Amino acid sequence: MSEFELIDWIRRRVVDRPPLLLGIGDDAAVLAPSDKPLLVTTDLVMEGTDFTFPQTTPQLAGRKSLAVNLSDIAAMAGIPTAAFVSVALPQARGESFAEAFFDGLLDLADEFGVVLAGGDTNAWDKPLVASITMLGYPAGKKAITRSGAKPGDKIFVTGELGGSILGHHLTFTPRIEEARQLVNLVDVHAMIDISDGLAADLHHLLGASNVGAVIQADRIPISAAAQQLVSGERENSKAPRLTVPESTASERLPSALGAPHVLHALSDGEDFELLFTVCAADAEKLQRHWPGPTKLTCLGEITSEIGCWLQGADGAKHPLPPLGWQHRFS
Ligand code: ADP
Ligand code: MG
């Protein structure tokens, strides 16, 4: 199968929808202008870092490539509209691999009403690399940034955290609908999606907002997968690795707080849940009126004093470092 046959196959698979005026097949796409601000996000995924074969299917790799972009649009409280996909396909894996990758990607795009408006297709003798750019618009009056957290705000998270390596990092549902519901209900001050880990991404939000925070250790919602990793680690020392080596992380957290499952929830990353802040009155409103079904948990509070603290049930506070995933260049 040639590049053009694959593009043709993709084109037949795509359902045109607004804001697309001209889609796949020309030198550039043409999109209808809108009176709302335009959200644009882009993400690069790589075989070996974001997924490995044959542990992952090409369908799930395609799904994840699109889903990480949807999560970024959700973090801005946006509605996604169109995507552009550039891929370097591994020649040796053949056309069924390429079609399966795009099948997984396009199924999720259809689910979220996103049109594939264009891209670029290359093949090489190296692993799969895909770069996706996604467009959207704010669901509410404006996009929600990381920088709006105010002292006294309550800090919330959707879903449960930790253990994503057991499958969630491939199969998660981007929180587009939850973000839309949130901005309809309350005034969200600041928001980020948890890709690097709760602790790391909380630090990102605090830094952008120039505030501090106190997190209650016993309120962190721990996923069943994180619990499973911990029992697996006890039985088998070759269990999946923490993104921060456990020894390093535990040295920096007192043992009462650094129970292994809490560490997983703080630092594993790829939860793709939403971390956000609202004023105290809106926090109460959310506690009473949040329709679900996705769980919402209040984790703690924003402080004017800079610094990030994890508070135990005994009231003692310990510094919470930005544990989590980082790409390293050197
Ligand atoms: P050009 O050589 O002019 O850049 P291409 O041959 O790369 O054009 O692409 C032809 C058309 O196919 C363009 O509309 C482009 O957006 C689309 N396209 C190419 N690869 C992909 C892809 N992986 N997904 C979606 N559209 C694609
Ligand atoms: Mg051209």
Image (cartoon, rainbow, N blue to C red):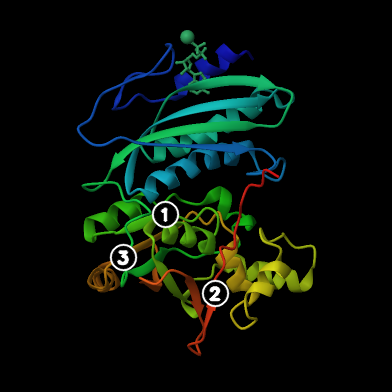
Label 1 crowding class (10 Å Cα cut-off): few <14, some 14-19, many 20+? many
Q: Is residue 112 left or right of residue 54?
A: left
Q: Is residue 248 left or right of residue 325?
A: right
Q: Earlier in the sequence, mark 1 or mark 3?
A: 3
- Amino acid at dot 1: Ile
Count of marks placed on residues: 3
**Does residue 274 show up?**
no
State the SS at label 1.
strand
**Within the image, what quadrant is residue 131 found in?**
top right
- The image's mark for residue 150 is 3
Provide the residue designation for mark 1: 192
State the SS at label 2.
strand
State the SS at label 3.
loop
Give yes or no for contact between labels 1 and 2 (Cβ–Cβ under 8 Å). Answer: no
Q: Is residue 264 left or right of residue 299?
A: right
Label 2 crowding class (10 Å Cα cut-off): few <14, some 14-19, many 20+? some
Q: Please determine whether, in this image, residue 306 is positioned above or below residue 58.
A: below
> What is the distance, in whole Å, between disc 1 and disc 3 at their CAs?
15 Å
Q: Earlier in the sequence, mark 1 or mark 2?
A: 1
Provide the residue designation for mark 2: 319
User: Dividing the image into 4 quarters, which one contains the N terminus?
Assistant: top right
Q: Residue at x 55, y 59 (%)?
A: 197
Residue 305, image x, y percentages: 39, 72
